[in-house]
Image: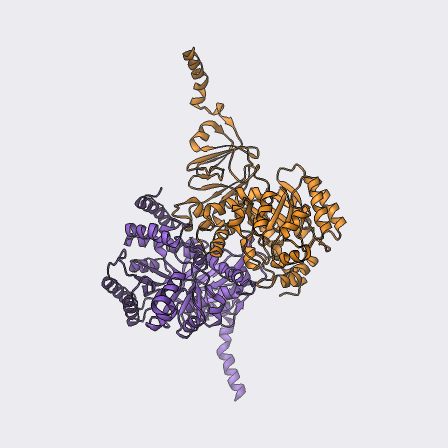
Chain colours: A purple, B orange
Amino acid sequence: MTSCRSLLLLVIFLPASLSSQATKDKADLIVTGGTVVTMDGAGTIYDDGGIVVRGDTIIAVAPRAEVAARYQAPQTIDATGKLVLPGFVNGHTHVPMTLFRGIHDDVTLNDWLYKYIFPAEAKNVNEEFVRWGTRLAAAEQIRSGVTTFADMYYFEDAVAEETKAAGMRGVLGETFIDFPAPDNKTEAEMLAYTENFLKRWQGDPLIHAAAAPHSIYTCSLKTLQDSSALARRYHAPILIHVAEMKKEWADSEKQHGMSPVQYLDKIGVLGPDTIAAHCIFVDEADRKTLAQKQVGCVHNPSSNMMIASGVSPVPELRAAGVALGLGTDGPAGSNNDLDLMEEIDLAAKLAKITKMDPLALNAKAVVEMATIDGARALHLDKEIGSLEPGKKADLILISLDAPNAVPMYDVYAQLAYALKAHDVETVVIGGRIVMRDHKLVTINEEAAIAKAREYKRTIANSLGLP
Amino acid sequence: MTSCRSLLLLVIFLPASLSSQATKDKADLIVTGGTVVTMDGAGTIYDDGGIVVRGDTIIAVAPRAEVAARYQAPQTIDATGKLVLPGFVNGHTHVPMTLFRGIHDDVTLNDWLYKYIFPAEAKNVNEEFVRWGTRLAAAEQIRSGVTTFADMYYFEDAVAEETKAAGMRGVLGETFIDFPAPDNKTEAEMLAYTENFLKRWQGDPLIHAAAAPHSIYTCSLKTLQDSSALARRYHAPILIHVAEMKKEWADSEKQHGMSPVQYLDKIGVLGPDTIAAHCIFVDEADRKTLAQKQVGCVHNPSSNMMIASGVSPVPELRAAGVALGLGTDGPAGSNNDLDLMEEIDLAAKLAKITKMDPLALNAKAVVEMATIDGARALHLDKEIGSLEPGKKADLILISLDAPNAVPMYDVYAQLAYALKAHDVETVVIGGRIVMRDHKLVTINEEAAIAKAREYKRTIANSLGLP
């Protein structure tokens, strides 16, 4: 009986083992060769791997030979000699603000906001502005290996359209703020706009529409609660700035008798759908709350350093079990770029110098923050953040053929401390190639750059700048 | 009488004003167009400038039209739409250590030195190693716009040969250290080697040979004084690590009853030929001494953060009048790259967060540190650091055609916070084009990269690493 079954198995599997093209499983895209850094729970790295994509989803990750034996696809990408990683997750930014990049730096936050940004926004931000800023930002982000980003701005429906056109994945939050914004002038208008926005994008494969109450210092209790309730009615995420400034913390202690995190928890904003940017002034109790409520948090080292707002307790947040990603913040006044690879490097170095301990945060940890932990922070870790069957095919190829890329002793150290955005060569989002060999496929980059130069003149004129 | 002289002048100058080719002044290279950021004392910027080079020297910097009217040259570089700057000065590094890049990170300095670097050096460093490491480093540095660097390592004569072959400018120090080094085993050997080295390169247009007593914690009083005396006999600079570690400072206070700076001053090491790397633990009296003795100091933000050694008081050093440049430090364990543009960005951000003041150090200041102040720190400001007639023609062209490069409101902010090493397109050193449109002219980059991969296997084997 046993031998008969063996014979039967032999008969069934023999043709497959001969592996003629006709009998191979069909896929749409195969990435073949390269060092595949999966960022899965076991930290699996394939030295000579392969990734199989069908539709927008990864269906296999395995050694190259196994993939070659079993799958065929009309489109392949040769990753030999390169690194293959899940796409980076930029957990916090304001993409249309690319058009204000460097409008005025080296200034107090207050001056920057009231003398430059608020007047510049009032005079210049409209739907067209937002579209061009988003296009420019998409080009810059794809070039640094970002495949998913979380955004907070105005006219977010236009941000969503441009993000989708660029083939990027986005968690995109329409801003609620207690003064007239460039798009909506009253809370009622903000609620109406956002409800339409949330409805429109439900079920979209790339766009996760969200509500973004700006912060506790710019939103009333009512605005915070209304916007959160609206988001939850549509199972949408809530994006908010949390505990970014010392003053915000001190005012909260004074007005509410508790920290920003405790206040937001008390009024019901925190939950497994909240994404909290910055989280600098968070004590042990706050960190416990953030972990228990499954809030996603996003660390923005460049921004925190440039604005001099403070240093987030990253090792402690990780130790408390908080899902902690990385972000660039907006590219105006607080960075000034959208290069997530610099944030990877900086997150490690900032933690080390702050703790005066070179072991405070290691290379693997910061690469996790840019990938799987970033996905957790956006509550999208079932969908993205690692290279595993069933996840969306968001992946990047990084060249190792530059002087800064060799020699390589440790792949995580190389990613964190030596490789640069420019080493990112090819980017795939949801199975679609959006950049190949440094050439953008989905964006008219020249037009976006030319338009940015035009906007510079208009914006500078509007503020009486040279 | 007056009218006659006027007529005569008219007669003499008429042919020149018609500006036929034959009557123009001859030069070797003209860079035409572009935003020329001179970094001269007045902060002159030409919006549409021109630079004229004869031999290895700049003979004119002026508006494009003036240059076109007056000069002709067989070779031109069109800089239209680009930035033109003096080449960056990397004030402190150890270039052959590129081959140890990332050998082991996220570790205490002690473990790194004694478990990894010292054994790796003992087993692998020879003249051939130093040559390949220098070639790789030259490629990486030129790609980030560095035209001059200061180095401390072993077999420095080979570093000098390779630096010259790459067409780079170097202040290159042979190391003195009180244990057997890979090249010289005793102080007597170090003195003999270094004397030959200093003699050999005297008067070289690119190479400034130097003596490099490692530090007060690795060199005896005798070694410090002998090496300094030797350098001074040949009018050569003295390179040394100063006040880099808390322990170094505490030990100095204990053993000598004074800080490292005061001790070095007392024993006669400090002077207008000394280049002191790091200068982290320097109090007000130390800063005054460094300024009075005209010591050049070099700030290394990435390294100081990564090793968690401490934060140099940069604004205070500048306020005290100290010549303060920027460095990457070695690319192993303390960075891990040679990208000076990242140090520009980081110097500003680290100062801001440390002082909790966004005005602590501005964009122009950090660009100065990478150019004219870096030249001052290396005591080469008569020769390099700005684009002015009489200075060496060390200049770089930076493209503004990438998404991260637009819009541009302020040129210094763009350089400090938005532009990247990869935006550096063309590099000229001493009038010689060493990189044109991202293509290296003087280095076989492919060979250096391939060799680095070979070395990785040998070095990893020698330490029993995977």
* Residue B147 vertical position relative to residue B181 in the rendered view, above or below: above
- Residue nearer the viewer, A377 or B129: A377
Note whether residue B228 is visible.
yes
Residue A71: x %, y % from top left: 46, 68
Residue B400: x %, y % from top left: 43, 45
Q: Quadrant of residue B305?
A: bottom right
* Residue A382 vertical position relative to residue B252 in the rendered view, above or below: below
- Residue nearer the viewer, B171 or A50: B171
Q: Quadrant of residue A408?
A: bottom right
- Residue nearer the viewer, B421 or A161: B421
Residue B86: x %, y % from top left: 51, 41
Residue A67: x %, y % from top left: 49, 68
Q: How many marks?
A: 0
Residue A309 lies left or right of residue B203; in this view the side is left
- The quadrant of the image that shows the C terminus of chain A is top left
Which residue reaches farthest bottom?
A: A1
* Residue B290 vertical position relative to residue A334 in the rendered view, above or below: above
Residue A2 lies left or right of residue B175; in this view the side is left
Note whether residue B336 is visible.
no
Which residue reaches farthest top?
A: B1
Residue B322 lies left or right of residue A450; in this view the side is right
